[in-house]
Image (cartoon, rainbow, N blue to C red):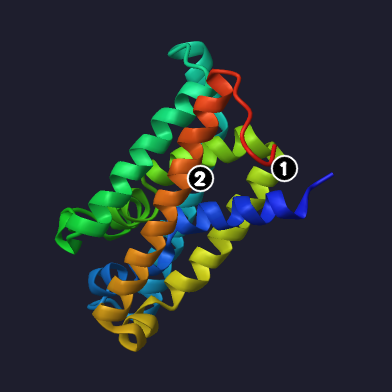
Amino acid sequence: MIKGTALLNAILALLSILNPITVVPMYAELTKDLDRRTRGRLFNVAVAAGFVTLAVLTFSGRWIMEYVFQIRVAEFRIAGGILLIVLAVYEIVFYNPGDFRPTPGKLMEMGVVPMAVPLLVGPGSIITGILILDRDGWLIAVIALVVNFAIAYAVIRSSVVLARVMGPLGTLVLARVLWIFIAAIAVHFVISGISELFGLRLPGQ
């Protein structure tokens, strides 16, 4: 049976780290010279590639941890939480849209790199997906992935319009606020990992 609170928490945690609103200005910039049909195809490729990438890494991550690197989930939760904190601090303090520029090559390849990876799906979302799977089970993880990429698809398909409406300042402010929530989620991952590793009991458990 799916707990509504657990499902909502999983969806919101992954949505915060995927944060499709933050890629709106870059997607609009990368596709500004394309016709509507080509832009739509490119967005479809980006979302599909992002979904497949995150789904595969979410469901294979634990196996890789346990059988390849022999790492316990609690240890990964601590390391992943620390990495998310570092990413959040970097994005809040040092964010620069110029870090991601399209690489030369075929047009649809741009939908995979950099539009799907790393703009939409980065280290933070991979870590979050694996931790949701471990904490809440495969069904909630699947639902969270599907719901989030449905939202991402809707946002990305509207990126040109949204970029005009929000403007660079609005996008910047929203991105900073969401990264603060991501930092809080990361702290929770670290604390829960430490409590599991040392057999501690968190308040409210």
The mark that comes first in sequence, 2 or 1, is 2
Quarter that holds the C terminus: top right
Q: Which of the labelled discs sits on residue 139, or is there none?
A: 1
Vertical placement of residue 198 versus 10, above or below? above
Q: Amino acid at mark 1?
A: Leu
* Secondary structure at numbered mark 2: helix
Vertical placement of residue 97 versus 70, above or below? below
Q: Residue at x 37, y 58 (%)?
A: 179
Q: Is residue 63 left or right of residue 23?
A: right
Foreground: disc 2 or disc 1: 1
In the foreground, 83 or 154: 83
Q: Residue at x 19, y 63 (%)?
A: 97
Crowd class of label 1 (few under 14; some 14 to 19; many from 20; radius 10 Å): few
Q: Residue at x 31, y 68 (%)?
A: 27
Q: Position of residue 74 (x, y in %)?
A: 52, 24
Q: CA distance from mark 2 to mark 1?
A: 16 Å
User: Most extreme residue toward the front, as rendered?
Assistant: 203
* Secondary structure at numbered mark 1: helix
Quarter that holds the N terminus: top right
Residue 61 appears in the figure: no
Q: Position of residue 195 (x, y in %)?
A: 55, 26
Crowd class of label 2 (few under 14; some 14 to 19; many from 20; radius 10 Å): few
Q: Is residue 119 left or right of residue 128?
A: left
Q: Position of residue 24 (x, y in %)?
A: 34, 71
Name the image quarter holding residue 78: top left
Q: Position of residue 21 (x, y in %)?
A: 40, 69
Q: Amino acid at mark 2?
A: Val
